[in-house]
Image (cartoon, rainbow, N blue to C red):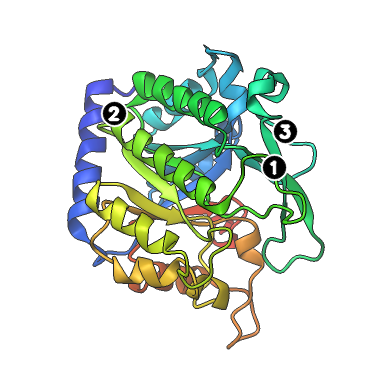
């Protein structure tokens, strides 16, 4: 097995080098996949042009009951990464994109103090047809948020310095404005997400911390100053930022997070951007064809200042 001390040294050097280099070099390539799938992609992870993996773990699989944590899936993936001398990013997922995915612990779904735990949301990814519904944890509920932070604390106690980084999922949510959950407001949601990211940064003192930020509910062109505030907070507190989609110069993103990534290029501790499955469906309006690896990478490097790109394992270039 790859020695832990050596892995920590490599991870520390990677973090230091990534933060120091700014955006002059091309972003590192990581693969992105779900929990329990990394073994099946060992052949990709072992490639010399792949620096590591980002794996998504839903809340329910990590906490079986209140305070009953099961991190065996992370340990298994970390062992795979260490055996190949690769880095591991873990994403702690509290929002889901299908009606069946109610993946938070049952005690939160059932306890009165948690208000049902989840709120329904809607999503229309990429250029696919149709609208799929999903769920988001009610982070604006202090009781729910306290349990999520307890999970982050337990993860940090076990993995801080062992994993290369931890990232919190995207800020975008889409609730029904005619049927908003009790206690919800756009300001309350923003405050909750800011509290979570600050908590994560304090809990993980050695591993990189990255918050995905793409859109904020109620906001367009920073008219609530949510976007400007999170970038300012991140820059001042050694917090990385990123996003689930690289879509060069797309209007929606250009009216929200992208200009701030450009403005803060070289000023953030880390920038991690993803090319997920929906991202692969977007087309370059100039060519009429889907964006290529070179086009994604150039925009991530030159405009967004990305240090790493988390690539879907279905990305065409990975099959060559």
The N terminus lies in quadrant = top left
x and y percentages locating residue 162 in the rendered image: 32, 27
Residue 193 vs residue 8, the one in the foreground: 193
Q: What residue is disc 3 on?
A: 102
Q: Please state if 298 lies on the left or on the right of 73 as rendered.
A: left
Q: What residue is disc 2 on?
A: 161
Residue 164 vs residue 177, the one in the foreground: 177
x and y percentages locating residue 284 in the rendered image: 59, 80
Q: Secondary structure at mark 3?
A: loop
Q: Which quadrant holds residue 21?
A: bottom left
In the rendered view, would you say 230 is above or below 102? below
What residue appears at the point 51 percent right and 54 percent down from the top-left corner?
311
Q: CA distance from mark 1 to mark 3?
A: 16 Å
Label 1 crowd (10 A; few <14 / some 14-19 / many >=20): some
Q: Which mark is residue 181?
A: 1
Q: Is residue 45 visible?
A: yes
Label 2 crowd (10 A; few <14 / some 14-19 / many >=20): many
What residue appears at the point 58 percent right and 88 percent down from the top-left corner?
286
Please tell me whether mark 1 or mark 3 is closer to you in this view.
1
């Amino acid at each position: 097995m790859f020695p832990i001390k050596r892995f920590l040294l490599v991870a520390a050097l990677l973090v230091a080098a990534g933060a120091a280099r700014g955006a002059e070099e091309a972003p590192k390539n990581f693969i992105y996949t779900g929990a329990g799938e990394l073994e099946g992609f060992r052949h990709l992870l072992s490639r010399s042009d792949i620096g590591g993996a980002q794996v998504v773990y839903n809340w329910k699989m990590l906490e079986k009951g209140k305070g009953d944590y099961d991190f065996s899936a992370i340990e298994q993936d970390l062992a795979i990464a260490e055996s190949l001398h690769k880095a591991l990013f873990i994403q702690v997922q509290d929002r889901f994109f299908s009606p069946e995915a109610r993946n938070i612990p049952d005690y939160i779904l059932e306890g009165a103090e948690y208000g049902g735990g989840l709120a329904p949301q809607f999503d229309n990814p990429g250029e696919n047809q149709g609208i799929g519904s999903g769920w988001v944890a009610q982070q604006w509920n202090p009781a729910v948020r306290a349990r999520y932070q307890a999970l982050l604390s337990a993860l940090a106690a076990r993995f801080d310095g062992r994993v290369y980084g931890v990232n919190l999922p995207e800020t975008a949510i889409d609730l029904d404005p005619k049927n908003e959950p009790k206690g919800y407001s756009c300001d309350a949601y923003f405050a909750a997400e800011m509290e979570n990211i600050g908590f994560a940064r304090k809990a993980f003192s050695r591993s990189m911390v990255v918050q995905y930020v793409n859109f904020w509910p109620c906001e367009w062109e920073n008219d609530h100053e949510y976007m400007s505030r999170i970038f300012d907070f991140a820059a001042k507190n050694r917090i990385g930022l990123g996003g689930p989609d690289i879509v060069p110069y797309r209007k929606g993103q250009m009216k929200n997070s992208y200009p701030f990534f450009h403005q803060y290029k070289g000023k953030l501790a880390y920038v991690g951007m993803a090319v997920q499955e929906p991202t692969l469906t977007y087309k370059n309006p100039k060519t009429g064809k889907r964006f290529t690896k070179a086009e994604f990478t150039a925009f991530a490097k030159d405009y967004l200042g990305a240090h790493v790109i988390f690539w879907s394992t279905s990305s065409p270039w990975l099959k060559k």
